[in-house]
Amino acid sequence: MKKIIPILFIVAILRPFNPLGAQVDQAEVERIITVLAADDMMGRQAFTPYADKAADFIAKEFKKAGLKKWNKMDSYLQTFPVYSFTVSNLDVTTDGEQFDQVFASTTQKSINWTQDSGVKNVVVGKDDDLRDVFSQYRRSGENAIIWVHSSQKQSFSRYASFASRGGRTLDVESPNTVVYILSDKAPKAYSIKMSATVETQNLSNVVGYIKGKRKDEYVLFSAHYDHIGIRRPVDQDSIANGANDDASGTTAVITLGEYFKKQGKPERSILFVAFTAEESGGYGSRYFSNQVDPEKIVAMFNIEMIGKPATDGPNSAWITGFDKSDFGQILQQSVEGTPYKFYADPYPSQNLFYRSDNATLARLGVPAHSISTTPIDVDPDYHQVSDEVETLNMAHLTNTINAIAAGAVRIISGKATPSRVDPAQIR
Ligand SMILES: [Zn+2]
């Protein structure tokens, strides 16, 4: 018996004291984030080969960690098409006279409308907010004809150039077109003809899985691996590396996969998802949410920008939409007695709950929240080419991953189940 004592001593000395229990290794965190945020990933922008390169790396890490492929998928990559529509021709005429200031945003190949087609007409007058109308119809999926007063010419041109980049959609089943015409009045009779070309591009989420005893109850850890690619150069650097946003969250998802795999078969199943295109339309989480029964997802830990300590100190992380379920309270209770604390998002005016992939799942009733630590109101590197690994605090990042693991334990073991989000309360 005596011999055991010195051995215990050595173990205690070598292992840093971690009151959170979970042991994710800082060197491993550094290894992964350094690859994801390297210059050769060129900012991991969706719809570029560099996003695919990042996805391949994450898939290899999932495999190495021993995660399973999910739901009869033959790959860790969940690949899906996005359809991109570009208007090639648009003619709007009244009494044989042509309007020359026109544009359309569309997800269909052609239209041929007249005043008798039953399409909604909207008038944007001198004092109306074109921005509101534009964003409303961008999301609504309705057909509409928008007559915009000529005094709004400047913003009209801005939206025209935005729309000329093309309309993307996941869903070709419900096509729609919105036509914008610069005109002081809406004529009673008109003809609108449009044709568009369509291009198909593939995107991929990366999905890993640990099957639990309760096979159909999922705890989901997610982060987006895409970023914003190449930007205007600053000091000869034009690569937006996205080390914090969101290589830090992606690194958390990978290392949490490694960690939970080592813990043996969990009570609940665990899904590890690296989303694509969070920065370019949210297509990754939107596609994923169509492939899963949201009722089966018990909780979604969406991890965003955890590489810099929060204003409240290094041992803290905040949770968006804290009052929308009791997810945050469960995490708080789970780390009670440790130096770490979870608290409500201190930047409600930033609408962060709606600015990441969690919102897509929350709209379906999932207790889906983002966990973050970066003081986003003052962060000089947010969406800049300066978002580099060197600006991050690796000890804090590792500590926060450990805290998330500790915060999740009672949910994974089935001892706690967050209340559902009420979709009626979500925009
Ligand atoms: Zn992000």
Image: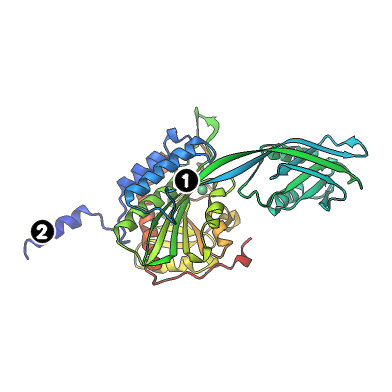
The outermost residue toward the left is 2
Quadrant in the picture for the C terminus: bottom right
Q: Is residue 387 left or right of residue 11?
A: right
Please give the name of the residue rendered at 59% of the width and 40% of the height, measured from the top-left corner.
Answer: 200
Which badge, 1 or 2, comes first in the chain's sequence? 2
Q: Is the residue marked 1 within 8 Å of ligand 1, measured from its CB?
A: no
Task: Indicate the amino acid at tag 2.
Answer: Pro
Q: Is residue 194 left or right of residue 234?
A: right
According to the image, label 2 marks what residue? 6
Q: Is residue 125 left or right of residue 242?
A: right
According to the image, label 1 marks what residue? 225
Task: Indicate the amino acid at tag 1.
Answer: Tyr
In the figure, residue 388 lies in which quadrant?
top left
The outermost residue toward the bottom is 415
Element type where label 1 sits in the image: loop
Please give the name of the residue rendered at 40% of the width and 45% of the height, measured from the top-left corner.
Answer: 58
x%, y% of residue 185? 89, 45
Q: Is residue 55 left or right of residue 203?
A: left
